[in-house]
Amino acid sequence: MSGSAVLAVSISVFGEGVDPDEVSQALGVTPDRSHRVGEAVSAESSATRRTGLWSITTHGSVADEALLAEHITLLFTRVSTDLTVWQQLADRHNTRVSVGWFMGEGNETLRVEAGVLDELARRGLHLDIEVYAPTTDD
């Protein structure tokens, strides 16, 4: 990854049956963001949430320009290492690591090390990468 790229990384547990308090207890950490099915989307809207969510992020805890492995390692230090807990969550809900990759230039490479992939797989976490191309000023 080039020095001008920025990453936004989070671990999320989501789905219709997600109870954020239950996930927090299982993983041993309070989420940075959460909601339950049926909660209002916003005070200005009558729309309600169709899925529950529990999520933590690296925002503000590691340099945005840090390598992906650094972001994921930091997230893993915040949560339970009990693989049985992770498997139970993955069996009942959608679990993932989300990466927002804001490219600084064209033709950049984002490396996901084998050890990181192994740790994701051991926890039943899917890896979602959203790539945002750099903007061009005309």
Image (spheres, rainbow, N blue to C red):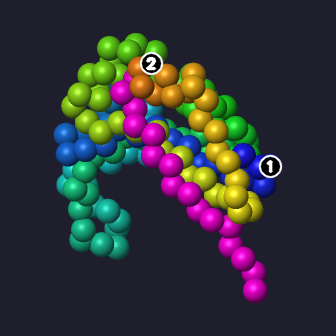
Q: Examine the image and state in which quarter residue 67 appears.
A: top right
Which residue is at 68% across, 67% downward? 134
Decide which of tag 2 and tag 1 comes sooner along the chain. 1
Residue type at numbered disc 1: Gly
Q: Is residue 134 left or right of residue 49?
A: right
Q: Which residue is mark 2?
A: 80
Compare residues 39 and 62 and report the one nearer the observer. Answer: 62
Residue 69, horizontal then vertical, whole percent: 63, 32
Furthest residue to the front? 107
Magenta range: 123-138
Which residue is at 80% across, 49% downward? 3
Residue 50, horizontal then vertical, whole percent: 22, 56
Q: Quadrant of the C terminus?
A: bottom right
Q: Examine the image and state in which quarter residue 121 appears.
A: top left
**131 in magenta:** yes
Compare residues 21 and 90 and report the one nearer the observer. Answer: 90
Q: Is residue 7 left or right of residue 81?
A: right
Q: Which residue is mark 1?
A: 3
Residue 81, horizontal then vertical, whole percent: 46, 15
**44 in magenta:** no
Q: Is residue 115 left or right of residue 122?
A: right
Quote the CA–CA distance across marks 2 and 1.
Answer: 31 Å
